[in-house]
Image (tube, rainbow, N blue to C red):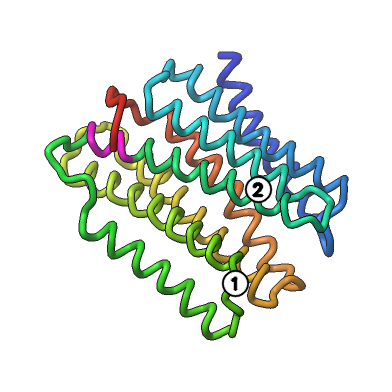
Amino acid sequence: MFPKILFALAVALEFVFVPLFLKYSWPDKCWKSFGYKNICSALFFAAGLLAMAISNNHTPYAKMVVIGLLFGWIGDLFLHIISDKIIFFGIGGLAFLIGHIFYIDAFSKAIRETYPSSGAVAWYEILTVVLLVGAVILYGVLKKIKFNPLMIAVLAYAVTISAMLAKALRYCIGEAVYGTNDHMAMIFITVALGAVLFVLSDGSLGMILFGGQKKNRPLKIFNIVTYFAAQILLASSIFFIRTTVLYGT
């Protein structure tokens, strides 16, 4: 019972600290907002660990998701450090990219568990990645964003998060078709919605950083709310998904 109370508390506290983070990070980040953001990140990581403990789910899927949450926390820490040095932005972005790789691995393991005879990549996964990355490139062209080494890193990140969404959707589609899990509705909410919110959050962040929207407060709120909602939902998916697949995708 106590771990369940702690999980509920971790989720509830996000509703307290996310608004505080938004308040103190506007119009510019400060050390107070740095502290609040790390509390928010610690809460979604704690939610993942508590979900493992409550459900007694120590499968490869659960472990990969928790590691992904940890790298999300690391990414938040470095991206919000009060410094103009690009190295912190780079480390933060790399941490998020690694986190998405762990999410991709988690969903890939779930796919193999659901329908092991399927191929490694479905055509609609490739289509999803192509469409999303194409949208990023089109946005850059319309905004006349200069192509430089940073844009190469942005495109690499766009490919990775698009692949994460594609894997999440493929797993949920597989569950809808094959019906191997009794918690199909919750899987769609935690996995599909969580992945979609993550992509929407990163898309809005791209508009803020590269599209001249740094003073757009509603967009900033959208970016942060969708991000923390996504991480909490992905952490909660541990309650519903178990895998025995250990290696490979």
Looking at the rendered structure, the secondary structure element under dot 1 is: loop
Q: Residue at x 77, y 73 (%)?
A: 215
Residue 24 appears in the picture as rendered? no
Q: Are marks 1 and 2 in contact (CB under 8 Å)?
A: no
Instruction: Pick the residue in front: 131 or 224.
Output: 131
Q: Nearer the viewer, mark 1 or mark 2?
A: 1
- The x and y percentages for residue 35 are 81, 40
For residue 163, above or below residue 112:
below
**Magenta residues, start to end:** 108-113
User: In which image quadrant can residue 120 be found?
Assistant: top left
Q: Residue at x 21, y 59 (%)?
A: 123
Q: Which residue is mark 1?
A: 148
- The x and y percentages for residue 7 are 59, 26
For residue 206, above or below residue 117:
below
Residue 225's disc number: none
For residue 106, above or below residue 20:
above
Q: Residue at x 37, y 21 (%)?
A: 59
Looking at the rendered structure, the secondary structure element under dot 2 is: helix
Mark-to-mark CA distance, 1 and 2: 19 Å
Amino acid at circle 2 = Gly
Sequence-first tag of 1 and 2: 2
Q: What secondary structure do most residues of the magenta stretch adopt?
A: helix
Q: Residue at x 84, y 61 (%)?
A: 28
Q: Is residue 109 magenta?
A: yes
Quarter of the image where the C terminus is located:
top left
Q: Which residue is mark 2?
A: 92
Amino acid at circle 1 = Asn
Judged left or right of residue 46, residue 77 is right
Judged left or right of residue 165, residue 122 is left
